Amino acid sequence: MSDTLLVSTRKGLFVLERGDDGWTIAQVAFLGDKVALALADPRDGAWYAALDLGHFGAKLQRSTDRGRSWTEVAVPAYGPDDTVATGDGKPPKPATLELIWSLEAGGAAQPGRLWAGTLPGGLFRSDDCGESWQLVRALWDRPERAGWFGGGYDAPGIHSICVDPRDARCLRVAVSCGGVWRSDDDGESWRVSCEGMFAEYMPPERRFDPAIQDPHRMVQCAAAPDTLWVQHHNGVFRSDDGGESWHEVPAVRPSVFGFAVGVHPRKPGTAWFVPAIKDERRVPVDGRLVVARTRDGGDSFQVLAAGLPEVPAYDLVYRHGLAVDGGGDRLAIGSTTGGLWTSDDQGEHWAGLPARLPPVHALTFA
C-alpha cells in the first residue's frame, strides 16, 4: 500500500504520510495558493503540482525530491489565432489557459512525456518533463469542438486522460461537455467514442449526440485497460472494449449522479463512486456521505458508510477527490468542506483525518 498521499486544496498542497499512528501532515507546499491537482510520475518519481493563481494565471511546479523543493516549469499556451466557441450564440473568443484540469504521465518507454488537459478544452503534450508544451492540434481542430460547451465551468474542459499501459500511443480523453475521444496513434488522429451514452439534459433529438455528452470523470483498469468506467452527469457507464461502446449501469445506490469514480487496478469489475443529488443542489442524498462500491461490474452495489460522518453531512466529493492506490485496497476521499477519509479495506471501513483541511480538489497516492 502507498504510504504517501498528495492532497490538492484551495489553500495549498498537503503531503500526508502514513505511520504507526495513522496519517499525519508531513509537509505543506504553496500554502495559501489554490492547487488544482498533483501528479506523482511513476517512471522517475517526480511530483507535479498544477496551481490556479487567479489573476496570475495557471502555473506548474515540479519536484524531484518528494516535495522538499520545487521548480517552476512551463504551462500550456494557446496561439494568437486559437479561439473557443462560447455556445451561447456569441462570436468565438480568444483561447487562453484557464486551468490545468488533468495531468498524466506517458508510457514507460516515453521518458519525459506528459499529457495535460485544460480549460478551455485543449489537450497538450510535453516531451521534456514540462519544460515545453505543444497543443495537440488534431483534436483541437476537430469540427465537433465548436459544439462543445461548459459543464460546471463556462468553457469546456478535458479532465480525464487514460494512457493504455500496453501501448502508450492509445489514448482516451473525456471532455465536459464534449464526450469521450479516442486516439490510437499517439494523438495524430481522433474520433469520438460515446456509443451508448445519453444526455438527459438535451432535447430528445440530441439525446445521443456523442459530442455533447458530459462525462464527469473517466478511469481505466490498469490490468485490464479495455475496461473503463465513466461517472456521467446523468448516470454511470462502463465500457469493456476500450471505449468503443458504453453500457449504462443503473443499479448505483443511492443515486446515479456524482463526480468521482475509481476502479481497482487489477479487478476491472470493482469500482467506487460517491453519489449525490444533481443539478441545482449537488449535495449528498439525504445529507449522508457514502461510497457506493460494485464488485461485479455494476450488477449490484454496496453502500459503504462505516466511519464516515453521521447525518447530516453535506460533504461533496469533486471528480478528482477519490483516489485508489496501486494495490487496490487503500482508498481516500476528500470533500469540498475539507474532510479527508481513508480506508485500508476497499471502503468497508473509513477513518477521518483529525485535521480539517481547506476544500479538497484532488487526491493522489504517491
Image: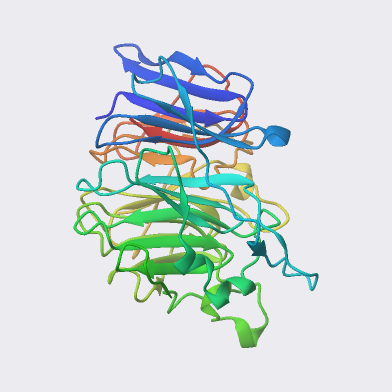
| Residue 19 quadrant | top left
Does residue 213 appear to the left or right of 103 in the view shown?
Answer: right
Q: Is residue 101 visible?
A: yes
- Give the vertical position of 357 relative to 169 (above or below): above
**Image location (x, y in percent) of residue 69:** 43, 16
Query: Looking at the image, which is closer to me, 211 or 278?
Result: 211
**Image location (x, y in percent) of residue 195:** 43, 79
- In percent of the image, x 27 and y 38: which residue is there? 329
- Give the vertical position of 293 relative to 310 (above or below): below
Total number of numbered discs in the rendering: 0
Does residue 58 appear to the left or right of 87 in the view shown?
Answer: left
Does residue 96 appear to the left or right of 36 in the view shown?
Answer: right
**Quarter holding the C terminus?**
top left
**Image location (x, y in percent) of residue 110:** 25, 47
**Quarter holding the N terminus?**
top left
Colour scheme: rainbow
- In percent of the image, x 78 and y 70: which residue is there? 91
Q: Can residue 232 be seen in this view?
A: no
